[in-house]
Image: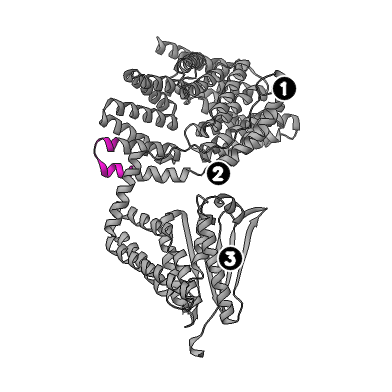
Amino acid sequence: MKFLLNTLCFLLCIQLCYAQQDFSDKTYFLIDSLNHFELSGDDSILVLSKIESYHQATEDTNRLAILVELVEECWNDDVWPRYNSVVLSQATDALNKIDNQKLRNKYLHYQGVAYANQGYLHDIQSDFDIAEQHYLKALKAFEESDDEKGQGKMLYAIALINEERGRVQVAIDYFNKSLRLAEASGDSTGLTHLSMSLGDIHSSLSNKEEAMDHYKRALQLAKGTGDKRLEGFASTTLATMYLYQEDYEQARELSLKGIQLLDEAKAGADKINGLDVLGRIAAKQGQLDSAEMYFTEIIRLAENANRPQDLVQGLYSLAQNDLKRGDFTKAEKNAKEAYRITKELDLKYKLSDAAGLLAEIYTQTNKYKEANKYLLEFNNLKDTLRNENLKNQALKQSIEYEYEKQKAVDEAEHEAQLAIAAARESRQNIIIWAVAAILVLISIALVLNFFRLRTIRKQKEELDEAYHQLELSKNDKILASNLKALQAQMNPHFIFNALNSIQTLVLHGDVDSSYDYINKFAMLIRETLNASEQEFIPIEKEIESLETYLNLEKLRFREDFNYQIKAPNEVPDKYIPPMLIQPFIENALKHGLFHKETDRELDVKITISDTLTCVIEDNGIGRKASKKINQSRSASHKSYAISSIKKRLEMMQEKLKTTIGVNYEDLEENGQAVGTRVTIRIPIYDRSSN
């Protein structure tokens, strides 16, 4: 019956084409070419009626309006993009020929709508770069035509993309701009979407009460729009919050209501959220067969709609369900597929979940090598995603405008006042078995390096005793200060980080690299010990030690850190006091670059004349931001190392009767911190002159 209806509709379309006798218009042939796709009866009737109206219209702007209606009402992703391309092409052609501003605004509107639809198509396929490019083009068109409603929608879409990619600060800025435009234009649909997004942000920060308030407001706004699709989506979103509160009755009721509305709106793919809630409820209540049915339907809908992120959610939930049933083979298959997709799309949050689930599956099946691999990746991803400071700052900015607006609404409508949400860190501690596994790995690494570490510990004990004796006797202040500097450089934090990085190479089977870095680590310790016993060392030796130290730090940061040391091609045979430069480099790494997620750069430039000048420049977060972050964490180590250097410089200055200079410079662009530059001037000692 469906086939006969489709055939009848297309025959009518073809007859209409011949009746019009205008084969130069490519929109006729778009109808014929749809025979290549499977259309529902509703889609066939929709296309036929809209194209018939299109050819009856006399004004070009009216024709474009009809095509836009077709695009908005058709949910077949094989069909509507074809007509959307026609809208974009015709609107752009018209803009190249028309000067009348009023008419240009109409075509700019249709051009903006077409670009927005193209962005949406790439957005649901997780092709975020191209999607954002189209959204920005649409935003430009709406701005030129003074279309505030269109601008608000594009700002919202761009905000969602940035939120998905972890650019929380950028997302919040766009959300705030969109919120103001939506209120100014009375856009209830836009306000609904924004309320849901603000709820998402609060939910991700575990501010559950604030998230619930935003989701409830979104549902109320959605009911006022008369948009069943929007109301259905808001219902299933609110259902998620009741699921977190273990109010399964409310969660189920809202999910079923939302799914019904989405079915009526023919928005099948948007049912995924509601199906996920129903599946999770069934799983928590031990109804694993029912849960599997819901999760399998999610996968089917996500595949048909080409929504990889929703597909990952379905696969992940199904794998968890399989694990509960003890079907490890099926659980492994689904978890691996979820891991593959998240890896391919670089979805770090979902990749972390998939890696953690695989680690749990392999642990339960006694495949410890595989479990180890995914556990390491899980922990690395957690470290990368743990930067709550940026989220807290973004949260405060997002609430600043929302609070003032909501306060006025509360006073007018006598509702409960909205409390200003405080940023709360809500990261779960690593589960016990993960900690145990990490301790086992560290133990293995320590055994592998036992003989080297035994020597290092012995030398460290001797250093501590020598330092104690020197402090008591006060026979040689310079040597005592060298030993104190050595203690600052050989802090347990640095030793642990170096060993942990070497351990990772060992576990990955990279024997050559691990052996190479073990040698470098031992060489750095040996060189540091030797330097502590000397008042002066060759400049060339100092540069070699810096290269070895940065090599080890490069191993820890991996591809997220690059450095270069620029020194004269021919280093003169002269001497400087030891261990003056390395603490400043460590300071740049720890307090400047560590808090930056990517593109860490460090430049060390050494010039030699009457004195040695060393310029250390990083592109980190700057001293002000670092001071705020570190004021309660590692301030004790920092003050100890820097104070030790200051004492050494004072003693050197007194002994050598010359000035040793250290100068800090904050680097800024457009008022924003972009790094720090430290300049150190050290006197050169020429033994041949004595």
Residue 364 on the magenta span: yes
Q: Earlier in the sequence, mark 1 or mark 3?
A: 1
Q: Relative to residue 140, is residue 646 drawn left or right?
A: left
Q: Could you say whether the residue bearing mark 2 is in a helix, strand or loop?
A: helix
Q: Residues within 10 Å of mark 1 (few under 14, many from 20)?
A: few
The reply to whether the magenta stretch includes residue 282 is no
Q: How many marks can you see?
A: 3
Q: Main secondary structure of the magenta part?
A: helix
Kindly identify which residue carries mark 1: 411
Q: Are marks 1 and 3 in contact (CB under 8 Å)?
A: no
Please provide the residue range marked out in magenta: 361-374
Return the residue at label 3.
678
Q: Which mark is residue 225?
A: none
The amino acid at mark 1 is Glu
- Using the numbered discs, state the Cα–Cα distance from disc 3 to disc 2 in whole angstroms: 26 Å
- Does 598 sit above or below residue 283? below
Q: Which disc, if any, is residue 389?
A: 2
Closer to the N terminus: mark 3 or mark 2? 2
Which image quadrant is residue 375 in?
top left
- Asked if residue 555 can be seen in this view, the reply is yes
Q: Amino acid at mark 3?
A: Val
Going 40% across and 32% down the picture, which residue do you hit? 312
Picture coordinates of residue 340, whole percent (x, y): 36, 38
Q: Is residue 40 above or below residue 173?
A: above
Q: How was this image coloured?
A: one colour
